[in-house]
Amino acid sequence: MSAVTVEGDKPLKVAVLGCGVVGSQVVRLLGEQSGDLAARVGAPVELAGVAVRRLDAPRDVEVPAGLLTTDAVGLVTRGDIDVVVEVIGGIEPARSLILAALENGASVVTANKALLAEDGPTVYEAAEKAGRDLYYEAAVAGAIPILRPLRESLAGDKVTRVLGIVNGTTNFILDKMDTQGSGFEEALEEAQALGYAEADPTADVEGFDAAAKAAILASLAFHSRVTAADVHREGISDVTSGDVRSAADMGCVVKLLAIAELASTADGSGEPGVSVRVHPAMIPRSHPLASVREAYNAVFVESEAAGQLMFYGPGAGGAPTASAVLGDLVTVARNHRQGTRGVGESAYADRAVLPMGETRTRYHVAIDVDDRAGVLAAVATAFATHGVSIQTVRQEGRGDDAQLVVVSHEATDAQLSATVTELRAMDIVREVTSVMRVEGTDE
Ligand code: HSE
């Protein structure tokens, strides 16, 4: 690695790629906080250029004259840029620009969860080869410091589980379904009216955004390469008011969780693997994550020595995300100035990702059944046939039918889903009205 040493007060030159919701706030803060940033870095931090798609697009910040350019490649390869901040998002052209920046000796700060979750190793390896930093705190949960704690603060501990509410839009929708009794569509419309949900809400509602973040969290927590394609993903569009009421009856609330945990293989042989998944789940109202309301995010970390930790705050938005970007920028700029670099990718553990079917979890199942002799026994037999032990059963009579609510003990997801398939096929079962995993409880 060639040392880059900025002498005395020679300014560090920063290029910003993208000037949208986040980029404009990065540019604003670079200007407004230039004195403090210089003191913290040890040299002035100079905005050297801002790459945009259209020069005349309306934007929330006045970019100093002459700094706007549509030539992003020219900006990152011009030779005098010390740090590139990439806030364009998406795979291309962001990946090519980051690779070009690293090849040209710049360090990189990015907020790009999609790129890191899909093709992280390509950019991590490029940073390693170039001997430069690649920091990305803003890629997961906006302003919340969570990647640096996993990468640095907990580097001496053993993380066993990460449970995150990492998508604000879906948390807002589920919160409205819980607190106002709204249906999914009504809550989604409210989220869209308030600007949380996009006109096409698929990425949020179907869990793609959370899955990308889960992959990044799992990679850091378990020192292994996990990509978005490894993440089992279920969204919230099938969550009904009935599910939410059923959760409330059990003293629980429904949340879309990103879960990454160390998990043994079904037969318990060999090294533990990693289970990484995103799905709606019921959690007890007493769990710290249950108190995460509206569009807030939180990440709950369990580790061997530290125990339980929770990181909470705004997970999106221009200024909060820019806060995380600027935090990285100060560290990266300081390293760059001193000719050093921070922690790079750590994937030495190389843990396997377990198939969802082998993941141990618990199910809550609500079933409408005929209310007659032998029905409860038949339902219990369906669970037993698949090796699933029942923890609780609640029955409510309603004329000639009854509702049974069964909560299982832990079993593999394959055993649990086979049980539900069998229940659906039984004559005495009129309808399986709610199936949801239960998390955050002690067995
Ligand atoms: N759309 C995301 C959310 C923020 O609703 O939390 C960006 O990842």
Image (spheres, helix red, strand yellow):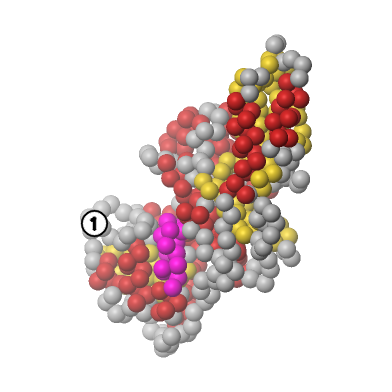
Q: Which stretch did the figure color magenta?
A: 109-125
Q: Main secondary structure of the magenta part?
A: helix
Considering depth in this image, is 251 or 403 the residue closer to the camera?
Answer: 403
Q: Position of residue 401 (x, y in %)?
A: 68, 15
Q: Is mark 1 within 8 Å of ligand 1?
A: no
Using the rendered view, name the quadrant where residue 149 is placed.
Answer: bottom right
Name of the residue lying farthest toward the top: 399
Q: Position of residue 156 (x, y in %)?
A: 67, 72
- Helix, strand or loop under label 1: loop
Residue 115 among magenta residues: yes
Q: Give left or right: position of 148 versus 302.
A: left
Considering depth in this image, is 277 or 176 the residue closer to the camera?
Answer: 277
Residue at screen point 28% across, 75% down: 77
Q: Position of residue 185 (x, y in %)?
A: 47, 30
Q: How many marks?
A: 1
Q: Is residue 149 visible?
A: yes
Q: Give left or right: position of 307 versus 176.
A: right
Considering depth in this image, is 175 or 415 the residue closer to the camera?
Answer: 415
Amino acid found under the numbered disc labelled 1:
Arg
Using the rendered view, name the quadrant where residue 158 is placed.
Answer: bottom right
Q: Position of residue 27 (x, y in %)?
A: 37, 63
The residue under label 1 is 54
